[in-house]
């Protein structure tokens, strides 16, 4: 019997969090209608509150895992997160979000890594959110159409979850068929971005950016100092800055922004596999 729906998300700029939470809550709502007991719904922001210890799940739990895409790949901190999750046969719904560019191999990576950790992935989807580095790219996403499609995805996933968990005897439950997800497991590591967030003139050295950085690339003693070898340009520091000071500055950043806006101006729509 399904007892819990858990959403976890790696969302530096917030868009992935919103999509993941909506999908998690929608699935829990559908599952609750068919349950004789209360279904617990929980969500975890694993950037702002990193996992202090591994999480273990079981067949009575549905996990929704949402991760922001970086250059068509999963970011390394998110892969480390997945390694802290132990499925125990729990059903998973995988979600990746990207800024109207390309989700590349990221959804396939998520599917493969989740399987290695003992999850049964029954649905996977790629959704569009505002680009983290270049905020004018897909600046109004997710919009109402995106949210409607996220709800449709959640409803379809929940229907499949209920069909697969129809028996109270775990041994009699139907096993999900493999998903035919686009992509493959890359042979090389993620591409390093040549752009990195830096403080602007309004920076007061409060240190909030250093506290939230998932790879500890910003000095706690002097937040103006950045270790570019560690920085993955996730933009969590930009989102968290209370003064709106941190950003991508300089002529190279502006040229890259203009090029990206031209290259990826055509609207892309969510895709999913169930």
Image (cartoon, rainbow, N blue to C red):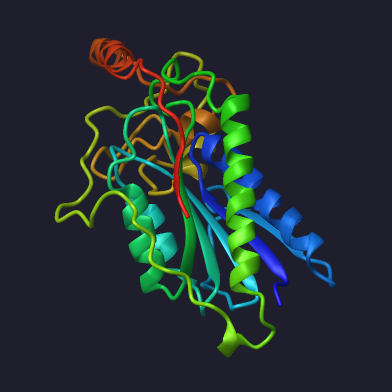
State the quadrant of the N terminus.
Answer: bottom right
- Furthest residue to the left? 187
For the point 59% across and 27% down, which residue is it? 145
**Image quadrant where residue 231 sits:** top left
- On screen, residue 211 versus residue 178, left or right, reads right
| Whether residue 130 is situated above or below residue 19 in the rendered picture | above
Query: Residue 128 versus residue 8: which sits nearer the camera?
Result: 128
Q: Residue at x 34, y 56 (%)?
A: 180
Residue 168, position in %: x, y? 69, 84
In the picture shown, does residue 12 fall above or below 36? above
- Horizontal side of 107 relative to 192 (left or right) equals right
Residue 261 % position (x, y): 33, 14
- Image position, residue 6 (x, y; %): 63, 61
Residue 227 sits in which quadrant? top left
User: Which residue is painted at 41% across and 73% down in the image?
Assistant: 117
Q: What residue is at 23 percent from the left and 43 percent from the top?
A: 229
Give percent across and percent down for residue 158.
Answer: 63, 58
- Asked if residue 74 can be seen in this view, the reply is no
């Amino acid at each position: 019997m399904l007892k819990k729906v858990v959403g976890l998300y790696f969302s530096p700029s917030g868009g992935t969090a919103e999509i993941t939470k909506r999908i998690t809550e929608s699935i829990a709502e559908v599952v609750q209608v068919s349950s004789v007991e209360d279904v617990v719904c929980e969500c975890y922001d694993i950037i702002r509150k990193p996992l202090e210890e591994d999480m273990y799940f079981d067949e009575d739990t549905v996990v929704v895992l949402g991760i922001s895409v970086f250059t068509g790949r999963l970011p390394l901190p998110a892969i480390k997160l997945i390694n802290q999750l132990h499925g125990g046969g729990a059903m998973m719904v995988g979600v990746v979000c990207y800024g109207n560019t390309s989700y590349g191999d990221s959804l396939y990576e998520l599917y493969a890594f989740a399987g290695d950790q003992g999850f049964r992935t029954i649905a996977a989807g790629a959704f569009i959110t505002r680009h983290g580095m270049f905020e004018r790219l897909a600046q109004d996403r997710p919009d109402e159409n995106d949210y409607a499609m996220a709800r449709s995805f959640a409803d379809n996933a929940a229907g499949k979850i209920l069909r697969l968990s129809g028996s109270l005897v775990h041994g009699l439950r139907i096993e999900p068929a493999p998903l035919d997800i686009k992509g493959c497991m890359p042979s090389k590591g993620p591409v390093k971005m040549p752009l990195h967030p830096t403080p602007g003139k309004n920076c007061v050295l409060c240190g909030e950016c250093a506290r939230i950085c998932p790879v500890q690339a910003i000095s706690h003693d002097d937040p103006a100092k950045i270790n570019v070898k560690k920085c993955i340009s996730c933009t969590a520091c930009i989102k968290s800055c209370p003064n709106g000071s941190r950003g991508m500055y300089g002529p190279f950043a502006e040229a890259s922004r203009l090029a990206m806006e031209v290259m990826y101006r055509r609207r892309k729509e969510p895709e999913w596999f169930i």
